[in-house]
Amino acid sequence: MLNSELQLKLKEQKILPILNTTTLSNDIDRLSKYLEKNRSIRYIEVTLRENQSFDIALELQKHFTKHKFGLGSVLTKEDFIKGQDHNFNFFVSPGIVDEVLEINNLLYIPGAETVSEFIYLYKKGYKIIKFFPANLNGEQKKLQSIENILKDIKFIPTGGVNKDNINKYLDLKNVLCVGASNFEEF
């Protein structure tokens, strides 16, 4: 159900940088350096893992006006609604958050790791799924083994993506892009 523009842009940029916040100045510096070298990147995920993460995400939106920010580690309906109220462009969860699924939003990317979860989400109308943690759940071999079974689902593998395996993921038909908190490596 993902918004088609967002889906197209993520496919084009191949990497979804995932920023685990530290301090505003450090995060601005880190993103500035990365975006200077990677001008094709437009979409960035900021995780809600720390108390200050939401406030930092708001400031990053103001600072990087040419970029679109999404919230990651969305665990509750309240996280989602608060993000919507502040015009974040997309939302990502590490797993299935049923109360957010019920909102049926075109900007939500739920996470899953098993074939049963993939099918559950597909039946709910979700065709873009964060595959997390990819490195603990079969990596690209798992996605390759199901690409002819679950043909309509595209994945964003996240967790353990590195220089040695990124192209193995990106070569798969069912991978939209990869998510990486170590985005400076690429």
Image (spheres, rainbow, N blue to C red):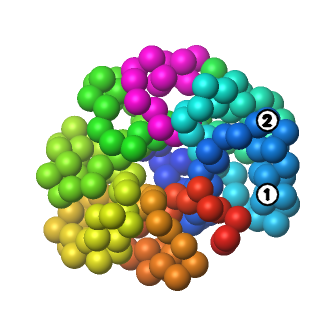
Q: Nearer the viewer, residue 140 or 170?
A: 140
Disc 1 marks which residue? 35
Q: CA distance from mark 1 to mark 2?
A: 16 Å
- Amino acid on which disc 2 is placed: Leu
Q: Nearer the viewer, residue 58 or 160?
A: 160
- Amino acid on which disc 1 is placed: Leu
User: Above or below — where is 83 with respect to 11?
Assistant: above
Name the residue located 27 percent from the left edge and 59 percent from the top edge: 152
Residue 83 on the magenta span: yes
- The answer to whether 61 appears left or right of 136 in the picture is right
- The answer to whether 127 appears left or right of 83 in the picture is left
Quarter holding the N terminus? top left
Name the residue located 45 percent from the left edge and 17 percent from the top edge: 78
Predominant secondary structure in magenta?
Answer: helix
- Helix, strand or loop status at disc 1: helix
- The answer to whether 113 appears left or right of 88 in the picture is left
What percent of the width, then of the height, locates residue 165?
48, 79
What percent of the width, then of the height, locates residue 108?
43, 37
Q: Quadrant of residue 148?
A: bottom left
The local crowd at label 2, few if under 14, some if 14 to 19, many if 20 or more residues have their Cα within 10 Å, is: some
Q: Nearer the viewer, mark 1 or mark 2?
A: 2
What percent of the width, then of the height, locates residue 151?
24, 65
Question: Is residue 107 in sight in this rendering?
Answer: no
Quarter holding the C terminus? bottom right
Name the residue located 35 percent from the left edge and 71 percent from the top edge: 139
- The answer to whether 53 appears left or right of 6 in the picture is right
- Helix, strand or loop status at disc 2: helix
Disc 2 marks which residue? 24
Residue range in magenta is: 71-85
Q: Quadrant of residue 180?
A: bottom right
